[in-house]
Image (spheres, coloured by chain):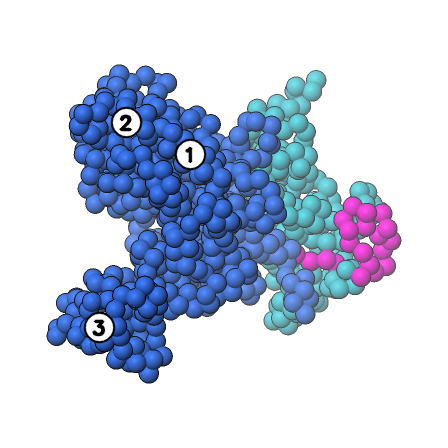
Amino acid sequence: MAANVDSQRPQNTRAIMGFLREHAPFSSMDDTHLAHFAEHATLRFFADGDVVLSPDDGTVKRFYVVKQGRIRGERHNEKEDRTETTFEISQGECFPLAALIGERPTRTLHRATGDTFCLSIEQDAFITLFSESDPFRDFCLRGVSSLLDQVNQRIQSNAMASIGSSNSLDTPLERYALRNPIVCSPDLPVRKAVARMHENNVGSIIITDDNRHPTGIFTLRDLRTMIAEEKGPLDTPIRQVMTPEPCRLSAQSDAFEAAMLMAEHHFAHLCVVDEDQRLIGVVSERDLFSLQRVDLVNLARTIGTATHLRTLVSLRSQVSRLVDAMLAHGADSGQVVKIITTLNDVTVRRVLELNIKKNDPGIPFTWLTFGSEGRQEQTLLTDQDNGILFRTPEGMTEEQVREKLLPFAQTVNQELAECGFTLCKGNIMASNPKLCLSDREWDDWFIRFIDASTPQNLVYSSIFLDMRAVFGPTEPLHELLEKVLTRIRKNALFQKMLAGNAFQRKPPLTMFRNFRYVNDGKKHALDLKRQGLAPFVESVRVFALANGVETANTLERMEELARKGVFDPKDANAWKEAYSLIQAIRMRAHQEMLDRGEELTNYIDPDDLNPLDRRILRESFRQAQRLQQKLEVTYQL
Amino acid sequence: MLEYIRHWLEKRRGLKDGNWDNLPSPKTVGDQLLSEIRLIVLDLETTGLNPGQDEVIAIGAVAITGGVIHLDDQFDLILRRPDLDISETVLIHGIGPEALTQGHETEDALLYLLDWMNGDPVLAYHSAFDQKFLEKTLKQQLGYVRSHVWIDVADLLPAFFPNAQTGGKGLDHWADFFGLEVSERHHAAADALATAELTLVALNRAGKDGVKTLKALSDKLRYHRQLQNMKRF
């Protein structure tokens, strides 16, 4: 029947409907709405450089779709007195949405680039579609971000197929059915407290003071430990055996924060409190992950308490399963890389702890990680970049300290390799004597790096300027970072060299907005890490270091730069979105490679993506170009 | 379309009795502004290449008004000619006997076409071919003998883009040159739309070259033809 209706439409109407169907949001619209569009459309031609739409034209009355060619948006930059291209619209994309919805003139001059044909409908046809078609209205109101949602939904539903549940990690805690917490006063004997837990069929009890502030928590695990280790009789007041100062979160925090906190501290329960720190509920691991398949906390705890290296090795395979589950629970790519990093941190810490137990070098040290691990941006494909920072104990030389620490580090590096952290080919590892340094030596090292920098050692900037402490005291690193940041802020030449280096990493787009592929025989391959993520990471690092931002995480750096007014908040959001999206596509590709039993790479063929993903990937790369333009203008490259 | 023609005929029943005065008169070349004028861009499918023997199977046409193609102003119809031997063109056009029998009474369709054309100038690619076939058909079926202004898009394009390296003179060459996607080649309506798109490109250039009126356009084409003839000798 539908085919019959379709064949009765004129050929050119059918052809236009066919064209529209290949592009979002039209691809999700009903045929009757597409036909309405096609039958009411006009087709216009604009030669290269022709003005299509201008702020002087008055209130916008038409809606356009590019059928062929491109439109670029131009705005005059008053400050620098030059014309900037603010956006580009290519085949299948629409304009001008904001002005049309806002019933105002456009603020941007729209100009044709190359021979360009546009389909266009008048305001009344637009209003008909707007009021009758849900996907169309959604797109018009929310623009490209509604498409981002579509992509994310698909990433989630793919992951969901292998797991099956639907709680979003963005859900605020207050929306979870917070059970009325079972509470007691500090003086209650353990026996009575446990009886109360038993009556209510719960695994935990919160100890509160007179103002309902939580002062401690007691769980069945604590009971088990108490009896096993004979810590006292059951008449003991509960305050003597409870865990004091329980972790608390506000009701507005989301499930993700709760999960991260639990994973970090290996707790299974958290107190939810109001603004006055009064207890309003308890959230358990089980509440967050109702299916019990996503065992983030349990996995972190198992890793964190493993007693043998081989247990650690066997646990690593579960991390990949967890990533699948996380994606299914609606974690975005930023959350997932943080989870992977958290679990990696737990593993690294445990390997260190086990080795200290076995063979303590006897000297306190801070275990540093660099590069992607330092940025907390690790995916499943990861290798070791680490080092050691120590304070030389009195009466010892730095060489003597190294004699003790290096063999220890050697073992740790080997054991980490067994856990799946590939040995660093460039020997950027704590067992390298050049990277096992005292605070003074590290400072000297950075002075040479910054003040006497050559283009060659700038290659290392992506490693050593993104660092973080994973184990040991954090204060020495904080002091070191303060000095390094001050030095970079004062050194304009170094900043400019860094900027020039970052500028070399061009996003993979050609002049004509097509993908530029890597030149190594892999015909249609894009390297999502080097070509897609690196332009963001490197450019953001320059701005962060130049403006005293201490955190190494790229998304957090962008947030901080927006707060400091270095980035326009809208730009920062667009760049964060774009960066996260490339990361998400990369992670999904990794999961698919794992499923197929292939070796993990960062290459993808954009032809394998659906048109929506391709378009969004292209848009994300274009955002990277805009970020680089900012770098170019700021440092006059 | 058929439904539409039926309604239209009911309203204008007088036409069937040979009362041609009710039909719009063909317009002549004058100072009409190209930026306002309505132009018909047309393409025919025929049973063969010889106007003496062959017949029109399908007519596709779109209208350009004010330099814009209005897709609610188009004509797309397969004529009902079951008596014809079409084996020859089926190969090219893909129109089989079944598609034809769905077509409409030829006379009705042609009457409607004339009314829809509104006497406006007609453009086609290699227009001499379409002109001969259409005029013959109008004469045979309706006894209609008035002539419209015809403009050949195959002349129009080289006149405004003399240096274009198209690699040939066909519609396909120019469509490729400007990167057009023709939805279904050799379908009358699709070819008409592609021809109309090329016409938009030429009209855009005409405006920039100072060719503003139908007369100026016609003069330019005559001059271009003369130039071509001179080069030939």
Distance between mark 3 and mark 1 Cα atoms: 45 Å
A572 left or right, relative to A615: left
Q: Residues within 10 Å of mark 2 (few under 14, many from 20)?
A: many
Q: Which chain does tag 2 point to? A: A
Indicate the position of residue A428 as horizontal and vertical percent values.
39, 28
Give the chain ID for the blue colour: A
Badge 2 or badge 1: first in the primary sequence: 2
Relative to the observer, which residue lies in front, B141 or A374?
Answer: A374
Indicate the position of residue A132 as horizontal and vertical percent values.
46, 68
Indicate the position of residue B163 as horizontal and vertical percent values.
57, 24
Q: Which chain does tag 1 point to? A: A
Q: Which residues are the magenta region?
A: B72-98
Relative to the observer, which residue lies in front, B120 or A635?
Answer: A635
Residue bearing mark 3: A236
Badge 3 or badge 1: first in the primary sequence: 3
Distance between mark 3 and mark 2 Cα atoms: 47 Å
Q: Which amino acid does label 1 sit on?
A: Thr
Q: In this view, does A113 lie above or below A254?
A: above
Q: Residue at x 62, y 56 (%)?
A: A14
Residue bearing mark 1: A411
Give the chain ID for the cyan colour: B
